[in-house]
Image (cartoon, helix red, strand yellow):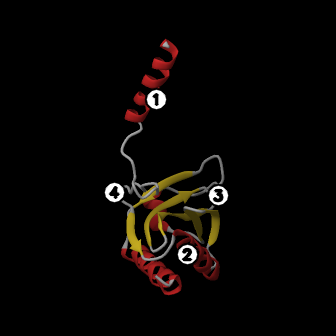
Amino acid sequence: MKKLIFIGLTTALAACQSGPSNRSGQPTIRADADSQTIQINASPETVRKTLVDSASARGTIVQQNEPNMVVMESYVRGENAVLDNEFGASDSGERAYRIRVRFSGAQCRTNVVQDLALVNNIYTPQEQSFQLPGNPGSMQSLQRLKSNAESSAGC
């Protein structure tokens, strides 16, 4: 009898500690202050496919392609005194922009969060990553993603 009461109390306590529930069943995506967000009237799968297809067409490297996240990299070629001055030299490896796009939602409503970083000495022991704030150019990319995904979504 004591064992049954203990199990019941443990279950009740675990339920209290689980935090707020998300009634839609979708995970909530947290956006940092420097992140950019957009709402797309398409499914997460349509958003992912549109994003990957667009990156491939532009020659952007897709490093990670998961159901709710795509990570892309675009290498910075040649010397760049402005980036060297702001973020230090990338003298032990290449420099790249890393774009992480996370998304969650339902059939015709997907929340998208984009994070940008500059990575010095990428894929070396001296790798350094610097979070960047969103900018008008990267927001235009998100708006193109929205337009392209919505045009093929049928929502």
Q: Nearer the viewer, mark 2 or mark 1?
A: 1
Q: Residue at x 43, y 56 (%)?
A: 29
- Mark 3–mark 2 Cα distance, whole angstroms, equals 35 Å
For marks 3 and 4, the one nearer the N-term is 4
| Chain-order first, disc 1 or disc 4 | 1
Residue 27 percent coordinates (x, y): 46, 54
Q: Secondary structure at mark 3?
A: loop
The residue wearing badge 1 is 11
Q: Amino acid at mark 2?
A: Thr
**How dense is the environment of label 1, judged by Cα within 10 Å: few (below 14), some, or many (20 and up)?**
few
The label number, if any, that marks residue 33 in the structure image: 4
Q: CA distance from mark 3 to mark 4?
A: 29 Å
Q: x, y percentage for residue 62?
A: 63, 68
- The reply to whether the C-beta atoms of the residues labelled 3 and 2 are less than 8 Å apart is no
Residue 70 relative to residue 110: left or right: right
Q: Which of label 1 and label 3 is nearer to you?
A: 1
Q: Secondary structure at mark 2?
A: helix
Q: Which residue is mark 3?
A: 93
Looking at the rendered structure, the kind of residue marked 3 is Gly
Residue 46's mark? 2
Q: Nearer the viewer, mark 4 or mark 2?
A: 2
Q: Is residue 2 above or below residue 24?
A: above
